[in-house]
Amino acid sequence: MNIAVLANSAYSDAKTSVMTERSTEYQAFARITHRLTKANSGGLEQFNDLVRAISDNRKLWNILAVDVANPDNQLSPDLRARIFYLAEFTELHSQKVLAREQDATALIDINTAIMRGLRMEGGDA
């Protein structure tokens, strides 16, 4: 085996496993949104799955809210305020879904819009 083949194989795993912050955020939203969508359309028998997906979605949005509330955050104040508002809305709407007063469609729509923004701005997701 020549040295070029060895070098290429040594670095191939590292090249494929490197993800940017934006692509990591996108993947987190994609996984949770997929689970929300699947459980939201499943009816009562899928309610436990919906509860778990909503819990994970709330955790994700809580992380984002804490991040944008940090004065050292580099995003514009307007964008930070919008993300914080969406986190608050997500929390309130999640409570309604868990009380079976609403479905998760609004949560899915918000996450999907965020994913579009991450893909459009970053181009690396």
Image (cartoon, rainbow, N blue to C red):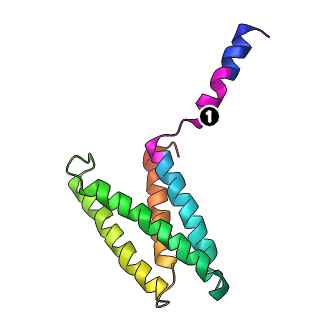
Residue at far top of view = 2
Query: Neighbour class for label 1 at 10 Å: few (<14), some, many (≥20)?
Result: few
- What residue appears at the point 67 percent right and 85 percent down from the top-left corner? 45
Residue farthest along the bottom direction in this orientation: 101
**x, y (%) of residue 72?**
22, 46
In which quadrant of the rendered view does residue 117 lie? bottom left
Q: Amino acid at mark 1?
A: Thr
Relative to residue 1, is residue 90 depicted above or below? below
Q: Which residue is mark 1?
A: 16
Q: Is residue 101 left or right of residue 7?
A: left
Q: Residue furthest right?
A: 1
Please say whether residue 56 is one of the residues in the magenta stretch. no
On the image, the x and y values in percent for residue 121 come to: 42, 47
Q: Which residues are magenta?
A: 10-22
Could you tell me which residue is drawn at 60 percent across and 68 percent down? Answer: 35
**If the image is split into quadrants, where does the N terminus sit?**
top right
Q: Is residue 122 left or right of residue 31?
A: left
Q: Looking at the image, is 82 positioned above or below residue 74?
A: below
Name the chief secondary structure element in magenta: helix
Work out whether residue 40 can be spotted: no
Image position of 79 (left or right of 38): left
Query: Is residue 43 shown to the viewer in this render?
Result: yes
Residue 13: in magenta span: yes
Q: Quick one: 59 or 92, which is closer to the camera? A: 59
Q: Position of residue 22 (x, y in %)?
A: 45, 46
Q: Residue at x 43, y 85 (%)?
A: 96
